[in-house]
Image (spheres, rainbow, N blue to C red):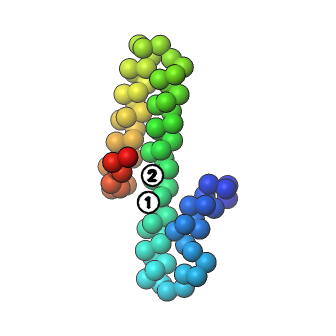
Amino acid sequence: MNEKLKELYLHAFPPSLNDSTLCRMSAEKFAELLVREFIERGDVLVKHYINNHSEQEQAFLLAAIADYSNEIVKHFGVEQDDA
């Protein structure tokens, strides 16, 4: 497991957790954190494309990334933060 996954796992499953209901809730939290990471990676790509591609390329690539992020949100049913 890479460091980012370990960090997300420990955030969702604190070592003191031992109740089965809390474990189920934490599993849901872990999944939500993963989905949010997918979306955040899309945001990182947006910044990359803005800085490293022509305007014409940006329009196409940014639309594709936005479609991907929206599809991830819809598919997993995770609300986006208003950050």
What SS does tag 1 mark?
A: helix
What SS does tag 2 mark?
A: helix
The picture places residue 75, in percent across and down from the top left corner, at 35, 51
The picture places residue 62, in percent across and down from the top left corner, at 41, 27
At x 43%, y 60%, the residue is 32
Relative side of 21 to 4, left or right: left
Q: Most extreme residue toward the bottom, as rendered? A: 19
Q: Which residue does the numbered mark 2 point to in the structure image? A: 36
Q: Is residue 20 above or below residue 81?
A: below
Q: Quadrant of residue 1?
A: bottom right
On residue 32, the disc is 1
> Does any portion of residue 36 appear in the rendered image?
yes
Relative side of 53 to 74, left or right: right
Q: Most extreme residue toward the front, as rendered? A: 83
Tell whether label 2 touches label 1 (CB within 8 Å): yes
Q: Most extreme residue toward the right, as rendered? A: 2
On residue 14, the disc is none
> Does any portion of residue 73 appear in the rendered image?
no
At x 61%, y 61%, the residue is 7
The picture places residue 51, in percent across and down from the top left corner, at 52, 22
At x 43%, y 24%, the residue is 61
